[in-house]
C-alpha cells in the first residue's frame, strides 16, 4: 500500500467520523456557527477540481420578471411571457401574484424563528426518517454526497396527505399553514398559464395531478466563515413539476444558463418559479428544468422557502 493509499484510507475514515459527529449533534450548520468555528470543517469543502472548474464569469443575462396582474387583462400576453421563460431559462420571477406581502414576510420570519429556536427544542424535530411529515435536518443526503452543503432545512409535507398542524412548532405553525394555502392558489394559477403555454386547456396540468404533491422546505443558510470553499446548495435541478421559491434579501441563488452562472437577484415581494424535471418530461422537453445552486456567504443568515410540487412527497 502506498503512502497515498494510506492517506486516502485515513481521510475517508475521518470523514465518516466527522459526518457522524456532525449528524449526532443534531445542531446542524447553525450549531457549528454558534459554537464559534472560524474555519470550515473538512466535510463541507468542495473537491479542488470542482473549485478550479467553477466558472465565475459574470453574465449580462437577466432573469425575466412577469407581472401576473396582466392575467385579468390581456391573458395571452402573460401566457406568452411564461412560455418564453419556460422554454429558455426555465426560471422566472412573478410579481402581483396574489400572495399578500404580509404572508411572505410572516413566512420568512417563521422559517427563521424555527431555525433560531434553542438547540434542545429544535433537536426534537431532527430526523432522517423518510416517513415523517415534519423533518428538520442538515443535508438529508449527508452520507451520500461528496461534500456537505452549508445549509439546514425544515421540511413540511403539505400534500397529497398533509401533516397535522400540531406537528409544527408554534413559532412557525400558523404562518406555514397560511402560506401553504396561498401557494396552492398561486400554484393553480401558474399551472393554468403553463397549460395554456403548452397549447392545452388551462385545467390540463392540474387534471393530471401535477399540483397534488406539495412539500415546503424552509432553508436556513448561516453565515459562512469561508464561503468560497463550499456551497449553500449544490448544483441540481428540481425533481418535481414546479417549485415556487420565496427568498429573503440576501441573495445567492444562481441558475446555470448557457454554461454561465446567472444571479437570481432578490426582487421585493416577488416569488421565483422554476420548472422541475417532471414538467420538462411531460412537456416533451419543451419546458426546461434548469440547474441551479446557492452560493454560501458570510453576511447571512439567508432564509428561503421552497414550495415543491412533487409526484411523491
Ligand atoms: O434556497 C434557494 O434559494 C434554493 C433552494 C432550492 O434550490 C431547492 O430547495 O430546491
Ligand atoms: Fe432547487
Image (cartoon, grey):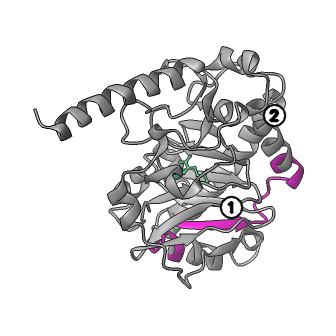
**Rendered location of residue 251, percent (x, y):** 68, 61
**Rendered location of residue 214, percent (x, y):** 58, 37
Q: Does residue 157 appear anywhere in the picture?
A: no
Q: Is 75 in front, or is 282? A: 282
Residue contact between numbered discs 2 and 1, judged by CB atoms under 8 Å: no
- Residue 168 against residue 80 in the figure, above or below: above
**Rendered location of residue 261, percent (x, y):** 49, 70
Residue at 47% over, 63% down: 200
Please check the rendered image and state whether residue 307 is part of the magenta-colored stretch, yes or no.
Answer: no
**Rendered location of residue 172, percent (x, y):** 80, 30
Residue found at the far bottom of this picture? 60
Horizontal relation, residue 220 to residue 118: left or right: left
**Magenta-drawn segment:** 84-104
Point out the image quarter for the N terminus: top left
Task: State the mark number for residue 110.
Answer: none
Crowd class of label 1 (few under 14; some 14 to 19; many from 20; radius 10 Å): many
Instruction: Point out the tag, 2 or 1, that comes first from the N-terminus.
Output: 2
Q: Which residue is mark 2?
A: 113
Q: How far apart, in angstroms, are the residues tagged by discs 2 and 1?
A: 19 Å
Horizontal relation, residue 284 to residue 31: left or right: left
Residue at 44% over, 62% down: 290
Q: Which residue is mark 1?
A: 251
Q: Is 212 in front, or is 101? A: 101
**Quadrant hosting residue 33:** top right
Q: Secondary structure at mark 2?
A: helix
Q: Does residue 107 appear anywhere in the picture?
A: yes
Amino acid at each position: 500500500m502506498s503512502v497515498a493509499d494510506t492517506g486516502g484510507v485515513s481521510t475517508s475514515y475521518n470523514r465518516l467520523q466527522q459526518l457522524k459527529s456532525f449528524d449526532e449533534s443534531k445542531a446542524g450548520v447553525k450549531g457549528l456557527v454558534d459554537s464559534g468555528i472560524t474555519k470550515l470543517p473538512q466535510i463541507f469543502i468542495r473537491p479542488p477540481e470542482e473549485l478550479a472548474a467553477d466558472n465565475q464569469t459574470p453574465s449580462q443575462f437577466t432573469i425575466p420578471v412577469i407581472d401576473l396582474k396582466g392575467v385579468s387583462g390581456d391573458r395571452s400576453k402573460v401566457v406568452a411571457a411564461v412560455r418564453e421563460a419556460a422554454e429558455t431559462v426555465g426560471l422566472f420571477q412573478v410579481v402581483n401574484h396574489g400572495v399578500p406581502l404580509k404572508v411572505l414576510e410572516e413566512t420568512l420570519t417563521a422559517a427563521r424563528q424555527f431555525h433560531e429556536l434553542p438547540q434542545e427544542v429544535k433537536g426534537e424535530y431532527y430526523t432522517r426518517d423518510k416517513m415523517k411529515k415534519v423533518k428538520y435536518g442538515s443535508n438529508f443526503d449527508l452520507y451520500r454526497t461528496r461534500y456537505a452543503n452549508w445549509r439546514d432545512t425544515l421540511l413540511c409535507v403539505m400534500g397529497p396527505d398533509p401533516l397535522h398542524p400540531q406537528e409544527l412548532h408554534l413559532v412557525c405553525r400558523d404562518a406555514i399553514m397560511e402560506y401553504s394555502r396561498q401557494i396552492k392558489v398561486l400554484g393553480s394559477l401558474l399551472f393554468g398559464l403553463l397549460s395554456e403555454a403548452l397549447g392545452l386547456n388551462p385545467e390540463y396540468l392540474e387534471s393530471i395531478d401535477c399540483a397534488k404533491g406539495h412539500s415546503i422546505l424552509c432553508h436556513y443558510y448561516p453565515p459562512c466563515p469561508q464561503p468560497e470553499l463550499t456551497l449553500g446548495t449544490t448544483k441540481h435541478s428540481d425533481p418535481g413539476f414546479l417549485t415556487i421559491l420565496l427568498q429573503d434579501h440576501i441573495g445567492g441563488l444562481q441558475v446555470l444558463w448557457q454554461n454561465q452562472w446567472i444571479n437570481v437577484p432578490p426582487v421585493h415581494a416577488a416569488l421565483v418559479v422554476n420548472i422541475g424535471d417532471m414538467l420538462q418530461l411531460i412537456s416533451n422537453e419543451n419546458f426546461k428544468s434548469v440547474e441551479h445552486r446557492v452560493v454560501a456567504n458570510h453576511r447571512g443568515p439567508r432564509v428561503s422557502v421552497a414550495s415543491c410540487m412533487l409526484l411523491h412527497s
